[in-house]
Image (spheres, rainbow, N blue to C red):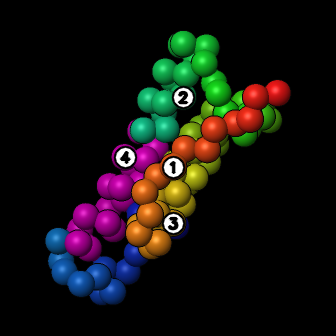
C-alpha cells in the first residue's frame, strides 16, 4: 500500500517521515480528484476505463482507483527507467 511503511526500513529519518505519513498518497488522491472534477466540468472524460468505473462505483472509490493506477504507472516508469508515453486510443 502506498504511504504505509515501517520507518525502520527507511534509509534516513527524513525519508521515513516523508513517505510514512502518506504524503505521496495524499498528493495522488488530490491529483485524481482535480482531474475528475475538471473532466466532469468540461464533459470530457476520454477514458473508457474511467467512464465504466464511474458507472459502477462511488466517486471516492474511483478516485482511489485513479490514484492507485497513477502510482503503478509511476513505479513502472521509475523501475524501468522509461519515459511516459500516452497510449492513444484507435479511432473507431
In the displayed structure image, the side of residue 42 where residue 56 appears, left or right: right
On the image, the x and y values in percent for residue 34 come to 44, 29
Q: Is residue 58 visible?
A: no
Point out the tag, 3 or 4, that comes first from the N-terminus: 4
In the displayed structure image, the side of residue 37 where residue 49 appears, left or right: right
Task: Report the predominant secondary structure element of the magenta stretch.
Answer: helix
Label 3 secondary element:
helix
Instruction: Kindly check if marks 4 and 2 are in contact, taking CB atoms under 8 A apart as contact.
Output: no
Query: Dividing the image into 4 quarters, which one contains the C terminus?
Result: top right
Point out the tag, 4 or 1, that comes first from the N-terminus: 4
**Other-residue count near label 4 (Cα within 10 Å), few / some / many at <14 / 14–19 / ≥20:** few
Q: Nearer the viewer, residue 29 or 71?
A: 71
What's the residue at 33%, 68% (across, down)?
Answer: 20
Q: Nearer the viewer, mark 1 or mark 2?
A: 1
Q: Nearer the viewer, mark 3 or mark 1?
A: 1
What's the residue at 57%, 40% (across, down)?
Answer: 63
Q: Which residue is mark 2?
A: 36
Whether the magenta-drawn stretch holds residue 56 is answered as no
**Looking at the image, which residue sits at the far top?**
42
**Other-residue count near label 1 (Cα within 10 Å), few / some / many at <14 / 14–19 / ≥20:** few
The magenta stretch spans which residues? Answer: 15-30
Q: Which residue is mark 3?
A: 76
Label 2 secondary element:
helix
What's the residue at 55%, 22% (across, down)?
Answer: 39
Whether the magenta-drawn stretch holds residue 28 is answered as yes
Q: Nearer the viewer, mark 3 or mark 4?
A: 3
User: Mark 4 to mark 2: distance in Å?
Assistant: 14 Å
Point out the tag, 3 or 1, that comes first from the N-terminus: 3
Point out the tag, 2 or 3, that comes first from the N-terminus: 2
Q: Which residue is mark 1?
A: 85
**Looking at the image, which residue sits at the far front?**
91
Q: Which residue is mark 4?
A: 27
Amino acid at each position: 500500500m502506498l504511504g504505509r511503511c515501517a520507518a525502520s526500513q527507511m534509509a534516513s529519518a527524513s525519508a521515513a517521515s516523508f513517505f510514512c505519513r502518506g504524503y505521496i498518497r495524499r498528493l495522488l488522491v488530490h491529483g485524481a480528484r482535480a482531474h475528475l472534477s475538471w473532466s466532469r466540468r468540461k464533459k470530457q472524460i476520454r477514458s473508457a476505463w474511467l467512464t465504466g468505473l464511474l458507472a459502477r462505483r462511488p466517486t471516492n472509490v474511483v478516485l482511489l482507483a485513479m490514484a492507485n493506477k497513477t502510482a503503478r504507472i509511476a513505479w513502472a516508469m521509475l523501475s524501468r527507467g522509461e519515459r511516459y508515453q500516452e497510449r492513444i486510443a484507435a479511432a473507431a
